[in-house]
Amino acid sequence: KLFALLMTAVLTVCLTLSACNIYLTDASIPVEGTVTFVIAAEETTEYTADLSKVQDAKNAFSVLQYVATENKLDMNCTWSSYGAFVNTLGKIEYDDNYNADYKKYLNPNSEKHEFITIYTSVEKDFDVSGTMGDPITYKEKTLKPSGLGISSMSLEDGAIVYFTIATW
């Protein structure tokens, strides 16, 4: 009886944890196609991900991690029960004297109430409240503020995920 009780407890914990994992990563990611991540800092830069090369893509965050690793981007995130919050993102370049150039780097100033906001071309992730900002156009595509955090966002072939600074 003790063995059966112990196995029931272990099974219950495993099922609960796997259910939480499915909930936290419930996003649609195609296995083929491309996605473009745009970092709109002082200089706007684009990074394209070939989704067929991204292993274990569960959501937009896992694809962003792949892009950051492949392109040597600096990315700092904070995790909460809501998922990942991108604090800083981009490429810091150094000259021969090791002076840093931050023109391709998003680093919000909290004293100015700045934060990184995300726009997307994926309609199912659009903010429906209308309070997150106005749509923008990038390369003839309409992008709207995401109503989801990066770790809950979906992707589709040809999607654009656009990071920029906003204020509150």
Image (spheres, helix red, strand yellow):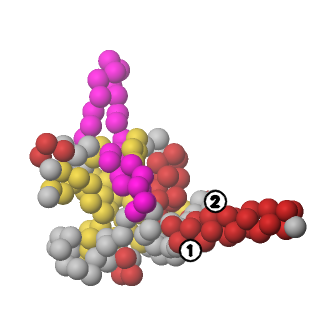
State the SS at label 1: loop
User: Residue at the location (34% across, 58% down)?
Assistant: 38
Rendering coords of residue 6 (x, y %): 79, 62
For the question of whether residue 96 can be seen, the reply is yes
Determine whether, in the image, residue 166 is placed left or right of residue 11.
Answer: left
- What is the number of callouts on the image? 2
Determine whether, in the image, residue 82 is placed left or right of residue 144.
Answer: right
User: Disc 1 marks which residue?
Assistant: 30
Dot 2 surroundings within 10 Å: few (below 14), some, or many (20 or more)?
few
The circle on residue 51 is none
Q: Is residue 88 above or below residue 10?
A: above
What secondary structure do most residues of the magenta stretch adopt?
strand
For the question of whether residue 141 can be seen, the reply is no
User: Residue at the location (39% across, 48% down)?
Assistant: 77
User: Disc 2 marks which residue?
Assistant: 55
Quadrant for residue 124, please give it. bottom left
In this view of the protein, which residue sits in the foreground, 12 or 43? 12
Q: Which residues are magenta?
A: 78-103
User: Residue at the location (22% across, 46% down)?
Assistant: 108
Distance in Å between CA atoms under marks 1 and 2: 12 Å
